[in-house]
Amino acid sequence: MKIKEKLSSAKRWLGEYLYALTGLIYPSNCRLCDGEISPQMTLVCPSCWEELLGCRPIVRRKNSIVKGVPIYGSFSLAPHQEKAQELVHLIKYKDFFVLVGRWVEGAVGSLTPLKDFSADVIVPVPLHHTRRRERGYDQALIIARHLSDVLGMELKPRALKRTRATRPMVEVAGHERLSNVEGAFACRKGTDLAGAGVLLVDDVYTSGATISQAAKALYSAGAGRVFSFTLTRAGEQVD
């Protein structure tokens, strides 16, 4: 294991330990339903976890053209609504990234459809370095690391980069989303994806603009097929 991977693993473990320790010292309420939680639980109660993990994933197995770019399949753990939406908000904006591992690993039984995707490697959709510095972490990278651990699939954490800062998508009207991220991604020099099936990972699938532009960069580096994985998907219900 490389030094960076060891440090990343140690950092994730330390984060989980500190959150658990906080729960022991300052017992609090569930962040999703406000119900009381025991000192042994951290942030989210068992009832809310059961509801979240009971969501049927949203799966698209057929090839589709997203904003002019082919995506050969997509998978989301839950619709972007109610408790799933709030959990993503906690992960993305409230520094509760420790919840990513519990969600992905808890939903391992729902990941079976990913076997139908001919993916070889996992690549996260990166934040721009200025936003990552402000936030202190990159939620898509954390999701990708846990997914890589669960699936036993190779992770290429630095394959993609953002070439420019973009506005947060929550601040952008639907018709402006594509132009906001158009040309905002590129593969790093030396990235070789010749013929590879790539599972592109992000937190939320909304309009498909971000996924399409990140996929476009992957194709430019030789990727054969691109699939997408997100925690939630907006605007759609399960099949």
Image (spheres, grey):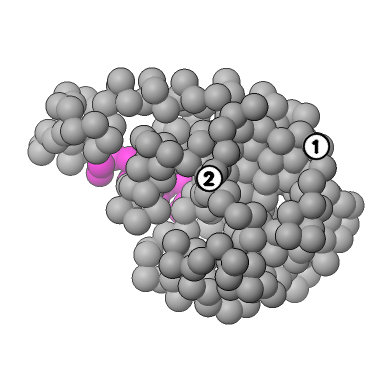
- In this picture, is 200 found above or below 16? below
Is residue 177 found left or right of 214 in the rendered image? left
Residue that badge 1 annotates: 62
Q: In which quarter of the image is residue 132?
A: bottom left
Residue for point 79% across, 58% down: 69
Magenta stretch: dominant secondary structure: helix
Residue 234 colored magenta? Answer: no
Magenta region: which residues?
Answer: 5-20
Residue 173 percent location from the top left of the image: 51, 66
- In this picture, is 131 found above or below 109? below
- In this picture, is 234 found above or below 32? below
The amino acid on which the numbered mark 2 sits, given as a three-letter code, is Ala
Pointer 1: residues within 10 angstroms few (<14), some, or many (20+)? few
Residue 127 percent location from the top left of the image: 52, 65
Secondary structure type for disc 1: loop
Q: Can I make out residue 123 in this image?
A: yes
Residue that badge 2 annotates: 234
Residue for point 40% across, 53% down: 92
Residue for point 52% across, 41% down: 232
Nearest the camera: 61 or 148? 61
Residue 46 percent location from the top left of the image: 30, 21
